[in-house]
Image (spheres, coloured by chain):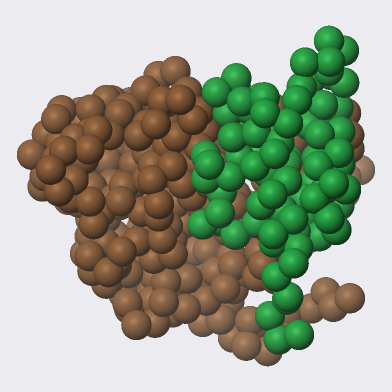
């Protein structure tokens, strides 16, 4: 059992942290589409949009654990978690399935995705289909040399600025979960209708919108994998997302913890540093405990992915631990900063708002706990 | 592991994990698992985990199709065939 990073991994993390800090240390969260696109360019310039994509398509060819370290560095040194989330979702839930299951025609899009020139949005969620993929109602009907897509996706991250979507549609209504197929859909195709940006409470640097497909003819070469393998492809991409994307939140928690320690050491009340009060110092200790426990679970889940063992329980444990730690630590940070943390613009309240959706996206905590419990034979 | 041993292991897992032990005794080798939504996205993930951990069979994504998972007979046939494929490098 080895718990330490290799020298290559140390270099990767340090190099990526420095590069992110150089570009994003003073960057403030923006929901302006033009500014968001410029920020994507900066992220792409240091390889963040292609970490785990094959080198022949412009990526760095990293495995899951090293990709997680890169994204952890991104979350550590960039306070716009919406941007971090958007880039990670583009990479893990869109580019990864295109790279692994796309035809040569579909893979032609990968170089643009790795370079950040093509921004991707994962179009899966529908009004009646969140955790239960088998309930999606968007259909893909064979037509000539392709498929006609019809249906509406209710929450597509990156959609307002996306150039391409990875989406899922029913091709065999009698086969349930295995009657779903996956497609990559360039936004320029006729019949792709992107709604206005959805107002959200957090992750504001990641614009999101509804996306409707109206008799959208998608070439057969843009189908990912075989007909009916969309459900399995989605689960595969979620394995990567639940593992690697959440590493960015380890980075956020590490940064947040540093800010909190500085705060409690620097602030004096009743004639002494507030870190001298046990109620304060133990809150810091609890934050570190949650972070390190979550970190170990996440690294292990990613390591298993690299071993070709995408363990459902390990991924669910990691996802649950990171998301719950991120929320609990953000609440603690708010308490430690007091009224200063509650003020907009200081970063603390933004961290809380950015962490709250972690127990919802990429599979709710309820579903992760169900998977863990079922793994126990319950 | 021969088919006649694989099939009851899979039937028992599905019965106990997804059908509360199948008290009505309705589960057969030809029960349409996908059509009846016994195998949904979550249960499929759990079944694949069971196959990996208990039967030591990794089902490649290309084999996760409706034809291979429509009923217990099809799943058993798939698993049995994957068990006979020698591991890479052996």
Front residue of A230 and A339: A230
**Residue at the image position 69 percent from the left and 49 percent from the top:** B77
Front residue of A134 and B69: B69
Q: Measured from the top left, where is residue A67 in percent x and y? A: 54, 69
Task: Please give left or right for residue A256 compared with residue A176 in the image.
Answer: right
Colour applied to chain A: brown
How many badges with numbers are in the image? 0
Task: Please give left or right for residue A39 compared with residue A174 in the image.
Answer: left
Residue A368 seen in this snapshot: no
Q: Measured from the top left, where is residue A291 in percent x and y? A: 75, 53
Quarter of the image with the C terminus of chain B in it: bottom right
The outermost residue toward the left is A190
Q: Measured from the top left, where is residue A21 in percent x and y? A: 45, 70
The outermost residue toward the bottom is A7
Q: Measured from the top left, where is residue A242 in percent x and y? A: 60, 49
**Residue at the image position 73 percent from the left and 41 percent from the top:** B47
**Residue at the image position 70 percent from the left and 70 percent from the top:** B85
Quarter of the image with the N terminus of chain B in it: bottom right
Residue B72 seen in this snapshot: yes
**Residue at the image position 77 percent from the left and 15 percent from the top:** B26
Task: Please give left or right for residue A141 compared with residue A190 in the image.
Answer: right
B59 vs A128: above or below: below
A77 vs A360: above or below: below
Front residue of A368 and A17: A368
Colour applied to chain B: green
């Amino acid at each position: 059992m080895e718990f330490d990073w290799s020298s290559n991994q140390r270099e990767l993390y340090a190099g990526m942290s420095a590069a992110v800090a150089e570009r994003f240390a003073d960057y403030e969260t923006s929901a302006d589409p033009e500014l968001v696109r410029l920020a994507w360019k900066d992220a792409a310039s240091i390889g963040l949009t292609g970490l785990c994509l094959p080198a022949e398509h412009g990526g760095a060819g990293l495995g899951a654990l090293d990709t997680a370290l890169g994204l952890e560095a991104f979350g550590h040194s960039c306070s716009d978690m919406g941007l971090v989330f958007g880039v990670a979702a583009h990479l893990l839930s869109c580019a990864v399935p295109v790279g692994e299951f796309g035809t040569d025609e579909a893979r032609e899009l990968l170089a643009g995705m790795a370079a950040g020139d093509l921004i991707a949005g994962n179009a899966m969620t529908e009004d009646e289909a969140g955790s239960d993929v088998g309930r999606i109602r968007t259909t893909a009907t064979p037509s000539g040399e392709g498929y006609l897509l019809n249906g509406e996706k209710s929450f597509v991250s990156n959609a307002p600025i996306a150039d391409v979507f990875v989406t899922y549609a029913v091709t065999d209504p009698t086969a349930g979960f295995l009657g779903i197929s996956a497609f990559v859909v360039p936004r320029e195709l006729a019949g792709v209708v992107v709604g206005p940006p959805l107002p959200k409470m957090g992750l504001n640097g990641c614009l999101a919108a509804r996306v409707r497909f109206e008799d959208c003819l998608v070439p057969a070469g843009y189908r990912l994998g075989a007909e009916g393998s969309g459900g399995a492809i989605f689960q595969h991409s979620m394995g990567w997302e639940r593992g690697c994307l959440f590493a960015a939140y380890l980075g956020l928690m590490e940064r947040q913890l540093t800010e909190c320690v500085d705060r409690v050491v620097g602030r004096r009340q009743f004639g002494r540093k507030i870190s001298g009060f046990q109620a304060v110092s133990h809150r810091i200790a609890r934050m570190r405990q949650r972070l390190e426990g979550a970190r170990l679970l996440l690294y292990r889940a990613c390591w298993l992915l690299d071993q070709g063992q995408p363990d459902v329980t390990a991924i669910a444990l990691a996802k649950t631990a990171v998301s719950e730690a991120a929320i609990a630590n953000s609440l603690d940070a708010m308490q430690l900063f007091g009224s200063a943390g509650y003020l907009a613009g200081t970063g603390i309240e933004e961290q809380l708002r950015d962490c709250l959706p972690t127990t919802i996206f990429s599979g709710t905590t309820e579903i992760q706990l169900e998977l863990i419990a079922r793994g126990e034979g319950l | 592991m021969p088919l006649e041993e694989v099939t009851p292991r899979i039937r028992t897992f599905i019965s106990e994990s997804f059908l509360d032990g199948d008290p009505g005794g309705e589960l057969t080798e030809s029960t349409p698992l996908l059509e009846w939504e016994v195998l949904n996205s979550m249960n499929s993930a759990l079944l694949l985990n069971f196959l990996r951990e208990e039967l030591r069979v990794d089902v490649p994504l290309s084999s996760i199709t409706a034809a291979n998972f429509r009923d217990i007979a099809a799943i058993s046939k798939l698993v049995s065939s994957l068990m006979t494929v020698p591991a890479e490098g052996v």
